[in-house]
Image (cartoon, rainbow, N blue to C red):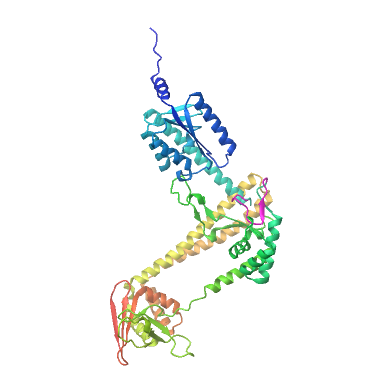
């Protein structure tokens, strides 16, 4: 009896393929390093496949290599047309051209194709997938899974390669900074002489005038221009002159992830975020300098001093922002006479008065004396306030933050030492160079470990401070109030304890002061 070799799966596939008449060709770059030539080669293959099967087609050519659906306008247009019932199938070179891995974007693409009974045709190896067929759907999910694994490996190798290149001082951050070009063979920065001349002129002008507005004005009059041929302004001049690169220093590790993905919450994407300046890494004398380090430091010093002058130190009085009238008007600290060194009176501005009550000025000394007496009376109850435990917790947190930064620094140095070993293995360093570098980092690591031990001891002492130590602290605090030697600290302390200090004086005889607790809402009256 002859054996029946009829394959229902093959028959089903052939019958489904016969139903395909109108298709969409979708082509895009899967990786950023693929060029226009690769994309055109893909289109030739896809069109040939459609001609062979006698399918009518429309091409959707994605120029960019977007990691998310919103970065792929042609795919969005294709999906809109699919929802209109225009196509029987979508033709791609490979499945991963639609999307790799899992996520909302892939789910949306496959959902639209499935719901509108649109098949996926893979050109190489040739295959037709029907998403409403459970076997096809499982096979497709498996392909997507392995495609995602491959993508993760590619990204990992790319990140590691970029880190190693940065460690070696190579420029892998896109366009080179003004004044430099990239050596295409070595990937190191080399001086762009035309732009370097402009930078040196800007530097000379700045050291002469010490004013970026003036520098930009003179530079524009003499015909100096930016890389794009635009006029200079103060921001552009400032940015160029404060860039450490022009002094031969390579600064990296300024951010994590890709700025294009700053709003992308996908699991497979590293979220973009700026790194704290304390964690930036520098490689001195990495490339030819356009100006000397001494000149750069002079320029930097000017900007630091200018920034400090814009934010002068604010002299805070112990009572700043605390005192109000019973009806809510704010008291201002004023000097009764010009020769007085510090404000000695609390005054309500007439413009701020919201009713007919006239509040008289109050001597600051009276309010401070009342505060002292208040804390003296509350001395034995002060330990019940939340402020002490909060202060204690804040001290621990401060130390823990320091500890965390040091532990990160410890890990960084240890990783760096491992990289030195790798550098020796890959012949980046000689044995002598590797030994010297490791010795330097070993001593640096020892200092960090010592600081970590010291902070751990400090945290232990704070956490185990007993009640007797606390009461001693209260006594010292009362002495400091009397001496009045720390107004900033006193103001911070008062602000944590009190929501307001309500002062009421409407005649020359009566004075009432009320302390409103910040946490408890209670009040204490002092009358004179």
Q: Is residue 519 left or right of residue 248?
A: left
Which residue in the rendered view is the most extreme toward the top?
1
Quadrant into which the N terminus falls: top left
- Tell me where residue 397 appears, x and y as whole percent: 43, 64
Which residue is found at the position 59% from the left and 59% from the top?
Answer: 444
**Observer-nearest of 517 and 482:** 517
Q: Quadrant of residue 468?
A: bottom left
The magenta stretch spans residue 328: no
Is 188 located above or below residue 291 in the figure?
Answer: above
Is 51 located above or below residue 263 in the figure?
Answer: above
The magenta stretch spans residue 173: yes
Is 281 located above or below residue 355 in the figure?
Answer: above
Q: Which residues are magenta?
A: 171-185
- Tell me where residue 340 appears, x and y as whole percent: 47, 89
**Observer-nearest of 395 and 2:** 2
- Tell me where residue 143 appears, x and y as whole percent: 45, 33
Would residue 397 be visible to someone looking at this image? Answer: yes
Q: Quadrant of residue 209?
A: bottom right
């Amino acid at each position: 009896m002859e054996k029946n070799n009829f394959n229902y799966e093959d028959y089903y596939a052939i019958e489904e393929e016969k139903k395909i008449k109108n298709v969409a060709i979708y082509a895009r770059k899967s990786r950023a390093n693929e060029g226009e030539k690769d994309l055109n080669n893909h289109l030739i293959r896809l069109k040939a496949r459609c001609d062979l099967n006698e399918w009518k087609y429309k091409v959707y050519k994605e120029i960019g290599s977007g990691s998310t659906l919103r970065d792929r306008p042609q795919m969005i247009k294709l999906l809109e047309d699919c929802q209109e019932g225009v196509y029987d199938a979508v033709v791609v070179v490979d499945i991963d051209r639609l999307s790799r891995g899992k996520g909302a974007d892939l789910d949306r693409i496959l959902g639209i194709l499935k719901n509108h009974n649109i098949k996926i045709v893979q050109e190489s190896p040739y295959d037709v997938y029907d998403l409403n067929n459970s076997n096809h759907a499982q096979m497709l999910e498996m392909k997507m899974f392995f495609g995602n694994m491959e993508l993760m490996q590619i990204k990992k190798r790319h990140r590691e390669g970029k880190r190693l290149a940065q460690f070696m001082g190579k420029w892998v951050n896109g366009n080179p900074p003004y004044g430099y070009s990239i050596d295409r063979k070595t990937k190191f920065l080399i001086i762009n002489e035309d732009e370097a001349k402009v930078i040196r002129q800007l530097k000379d002008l700045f050291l002469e005038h010490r004013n970026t507005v003036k520098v930009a004005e003179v530079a524009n009059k003499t015909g100096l221009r930016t890389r794009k041929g635009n006029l200079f302004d103060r921001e552009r001049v400032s940015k160029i002159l404060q860039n450490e690169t022009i002094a031969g220093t390579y600064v990296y590790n300024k951010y994590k992830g890709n700025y294009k993905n700053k709003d992308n919450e996908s699991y497979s994407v590293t979220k973009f975020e700026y790194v704290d300046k304390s964690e930036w890494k520098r490689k001195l004398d990495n490339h030819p300098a356009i100006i000397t380090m001494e000149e750069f430091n002079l320029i930097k010093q000017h900007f630091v001093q200018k920034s400090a002058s814009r934010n002068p130190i604010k002299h805070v009085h112990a009572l700043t922002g605390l005192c109000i009238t019973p009806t809510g008007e704010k008291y201002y600290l004023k000097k009764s006479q010009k020769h007085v060194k510090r404000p000695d009176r609390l005054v309500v501005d007439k413009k701020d008065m919201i009713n007919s009550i006239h509040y008289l000025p109050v001597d600051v000394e009276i309010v401070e004396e009342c505060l002292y007496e208040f804390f003296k009376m509350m001395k034995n109850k002060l330990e019940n306030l939340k402020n002490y435990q909060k202060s204690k917790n804040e001290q621990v947190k401060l130390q823990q933050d320091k500890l965390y930064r040091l532990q990160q620094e410890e890990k960084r140095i240890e990783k760096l030492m491992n990289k030195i070993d790798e550098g020796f293995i890959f012949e980046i360093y000689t044995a002598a160079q590797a030994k010297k570098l490791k010795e330097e980092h070993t001593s640096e690591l020892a200092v960090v470990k010592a600081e970590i031990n010291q902070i751990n001891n400090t945290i232990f002492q704070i956490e185990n401070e007993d009640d007797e130590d606390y009461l001693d602290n209260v006594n010292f605090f009362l002495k400091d109030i009397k001496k009045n030697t720390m107004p900033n600290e006193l103001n911070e302390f008062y602000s944590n304890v009190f929501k307001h200090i309500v002062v009421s004086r409407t005649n020359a005889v009566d004075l009432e002061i009320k302390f409103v607790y910040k946490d408890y809402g209670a009040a204490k009256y002092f009358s004179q």
